[in-house]
Amino acid sequence: TTLPRVSVKGNRFVDPDGKPILFRGLCISDPDKLKQQGHWNKEHFQKVKEMGTMLLRIPVHPVAWRERGGAEYVKLLDEAVQWSTELGMYVMIDWHSIGNMTTGVYQNPMYDTTKEETYGFWRAMSQRYGRNNTVAFFEFFNEPAAFGRVNWEAWKTIVEDEIAIVRSNNAQAIPMVAGFDWAYDLTPLRLNPIAAEGIGYRSEEHTSELQSLRH
């Protein structure tokens, strides 16, 4: 069973008939952590579904991706996508890092990554899940934070590189771009938006909020 494909129309996420979709979602723990704790099973996903979840956010920490190894980690994501499909939930894959990729300074060692590793991760995700309707969103980076010098132009360039990588693999998943300054600030987009269509922007709030914009 496959879910209907989600796409962007104007400033809305829509189904194949063009009907707007309001997602209500939930973020689970890193699959690697759940596996180690003995909670990685379909029952966990069923409990999530019972809470009314339409969109399941799956955070992948760079340290977990490296330590488990990409090939083994993908096995967990394959199970997540299968269980979510069977339960009728969409998935957002989140590269869960907090810090400054231009300076290489991060809030905590578990978030440490590089542009090369990040680009490689999204290449792998787009090749495997980019045309899977269940995986509706790719959240490129959880919270870009100003540890050291950084500006919107530099961050914008990184994001546009990531979009080019996933779309080179014909990925239909919608790129989700975090705002600036711990993902709170979307104001730079007004004057210098990301040079791509069919993407979404997200900001950190007390309750998660998804916003889609088309240029």
Image (tube, rainbow, N blue to C red):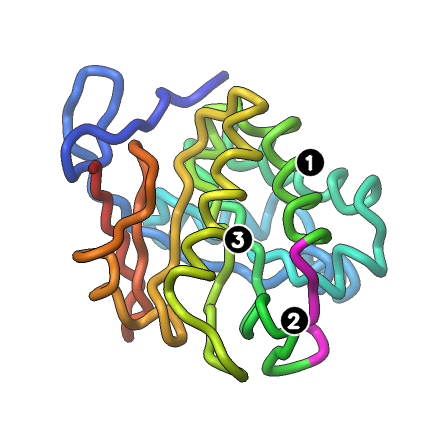
Q: Is residue 43 magenta?
A: no
Q: Pointer 2: what residue?
A: 111
Amino acid at pointer 1: Ala
Report x, y in % for residue 99. 55, 74
Q: Quadrant of residue 120?
A: top right
Q: Mark 2 vs mark 3: give the one in front.
A: 2
Amino acid at pointer 3: Asp
In the image: residue 37, left or right of residue 61: right
Q: Pointer 3: what residue?
A: 94
Report x, y in % for residue 209. 26, 59
Q: Pointer 1: what residue?
A: 124
Q: Mark 3 vs mark 1: give the one in front.
A: 1
Q: 75 or 202: which is nearer to us? A: 202
- Dot 1 lies on which element? helix
The residue stretch that appears in magenta: 109-115
- Dot 3 lies on which element? strand
